[in-house]
Amino acid sequence: MPPISKLHTEEGFVEATDLSRWRLKVGHGRQIWHYLENGEVENWPQSIIEKYWLGLPFESKEFDKPKTALEAARNGFEFFKQLQTEDGHWAGEYGGPMFLLPGLIISMYITRIPIPESWRIEIIRYLFNKANPDDGGWGIHTEGQSTTFGTALNYVVVRILGVDADHPYMVKARATLHKLGSAIAIPSWGKFWLACLNVYDWEGMNPIPPELWLLPYAIPFHPGRYWVHCRAVYLPMGYMYGRRLSVDINPFIESLRQELYVQPYDTIDWVRARNNVSNADIYLPRTKSLTLINIILNVYEKLPNLFGLRQISLDEAYKLMQYEDENTDYLDLAPVSKAIHILCTYYEEGSNSEAFKLAKERLIDFMWMSSEGMMMNGTNGSQLWDTAFAAQACIEAGLANNTENHKVMLKTLEFLDDAQIKRNPTNMEYCYRHPSKGAWGFSTRDQGYTVSDCTAEGMKAVLYLQNRLDYTPNLISKERLYQAVDILLTMQNNDGGFASYEKVRGPEFLEWINPSEVFGKIMIEYSYPECTTAVLTGLSIFRKYYPDYRADEIEKVCQKAANFIHATQRNDGSWYGSWAICFTYASMFALESLAYFGETYNNSKSVRKGCDFLISKQRKDGGWGEAYKSCETGIYHEHSQSQVVNTAWALLGLMSAKYPDEKPIQRGIELLMSRQLSTGEWKQEAIEGIFNKSVAISYPNYKFIFTIWALGKYAKIYNNPIIKY
Ligand code: LAN
């Protein structure tokens, strides 16, 4: 291992690797951060992409202060295109949630997967960087206040990685954990991880019976009807719970048992601990229905194992997990289920099995290296999503025809070609999967899950690239575009809206028995304005180029989608966004899609209200700035400062709607231009994304994509006037 530098902080020092040795390997969207060890050939210079994401200095062209929005857009893209990877996508950090690394590290510890030294050092550094400065604890996400969930789990991670319990950071974090109620009061997902690690008793968990999978699908609470992420997590959790598996006790585990609690471990009343959750953590208080169900399930757990049902259901659960592994090339749907799967594989098949080896090789796909250390991404990346938008931004901004951008756009198209999912999952019906042939997912083709809006955005990007530029080949055939449309047409809900991965399959009352305590609206799929607007826009563009394909059906689907968008508009004219912050985000998409559907400021009351809402939130400096609290509370919250990303969204919404007054739009453009650096880039501002109402997640490429898009669109609509700022 090459030398480690020691970064000094007030409380001592934190080790760091030599950042100049990190390299990002890519292929088919796969992103792997590799640390050059001593003796490795070093004629592999660090690229701008690596330097950018590691926060290291690099040379980049500097521009004179732009006079027009088009010039600013061009400079922005000149910078941004340097970050395109060899395989044609835009990579990026996808951090924010603070409950992902713990699953990974606890699983690696239990299954004895060696943790590379470079990871060890950088994960510790990341967690120390993300600890809340006042109390040393961690929240559920990087911007949140300390909770037992974040603090107990990340404390355990740092300890596993070798930091002593009497390190000043640990002392401080432990005091905070104890103040918040100690690890007894950790929410259920935390109880689960601690039980696997044998520092919490399985008795202290409310049951997750794997038998649920044996119920007939017709029953409304069959797990096959849950939101795909919910069932993907509870499937392997149920397996582990059903077998009550934990790592063997050893002196380290014994020490953790002392550190995490304020009373001796043997004196803890585990039955009481089941329902003990710290107030600092609760997003969703437990309902009476859930309490009742837990009582019944706890009685069931005490009954004799009837007809060997437990074993039958464990076999069924494991079979479903195997299909999931195979269908996703061992990536699994997302990092939480991935980390539990690897534990289940270890216990079921052993560490020498082929399945375990394949699963292990995919862990690295989730790791992201940054200037602040190493984190686990929220998915195996946001490749398709960012790249589809980057293409649209470049084309819509009128930059794609410039010869210097041809190569970039050609590579983008190649990536989109590669990322389209070419097949349905095997045993599709058996494992409750939606078809995927022709769809695009959020990250890579290997991951393989259809997402409605990703399919729509992927298709839109291809339609633009192949039809609006004269130098691009038709890499994606008409038939393959038809397949994408076919998938979209299977995804509309009865209310006209589109959900994220599938149609809504279960009743909304399932939310009453949401056992997570920390996430809202996770039990079933819901129709989302953002997903619906993306599909409406995508289909509207598709039918311009292919007017004969399933025309009547597309017309009906679009009409119903537009009705849904009208129906979900709030009284103040806004739309609530579930996947980024928040009203500015969803309102942009809504106004864009309504414009494609023929509704603009002049002819639609709804669009007028939407614009008036946005205008009412414009700030004195010409920008918009929305805080993630909007998503938690459902009420518009101002950020302390205007944000380029919110500003770009609001401007794009207004411009799509053909808002008649140029003045406010121009003021927003001035703000975007005033924040641009001489290299063409914009600096990172507040976190952009959100999920499950309570967890913030970063989309660092948005500050480029949407700003460039807004600037270019402005230049086109208003004939690119000189801007003073
Ligand atoms: C995502 C990221 C992308 C997002 C959009 C495409 C933006 C959205 O429009 C549809 C939903 C989707 C695909 C989405 C769903 C939930 C995800 C996968 C995430 C927010 C990224 C991380 C999150 C996942 C659930 C994280 C793991 C945590 C659990 C609670 C299981």
Image (tube, grey):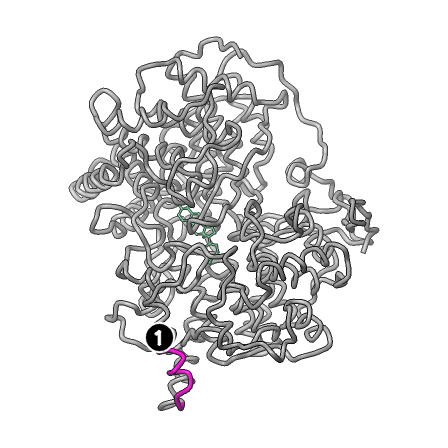
Of the pair 328 and 469, the residue shown nearer to us: 328
Determine the residue positioned at 75% across, 46% down: 21
Q: Nearer the viewer, residue 644 or 277?
A: 277
Q: Position of residue 686 (x, y in %)?
A: 54, 36
**Is residue 303 rendered magenta in the image?**
yes
Q: Which residue is mark 1?
A: 212
Image coordinates for residue 721, horizontal then vertical, percent: 45, 9
- The residue lying toward the viewer, choosing from 174 and 448, is 174
- Helix, strand or loop at mark 1: helix
Q: Is residue 235 left or right of residue 592?
A: right
Report the magenta stretch's main SS.
helix
Does 712 sit above or below residue 20? above
| Residue 637 lies in quadrant | top left
Q: Is residue 699 left or right of residue 20?
A: left
Q: Position of residue 519 (x, y in %)?
A: 43, 55
Examine the structure image and report whether residue 309 is included in the region drawn in magenta.
Answer: no
Q: Which residues are magenta?
A: 296-304
From the viewer's perspective, is 511 left or right of 642? Answer: left
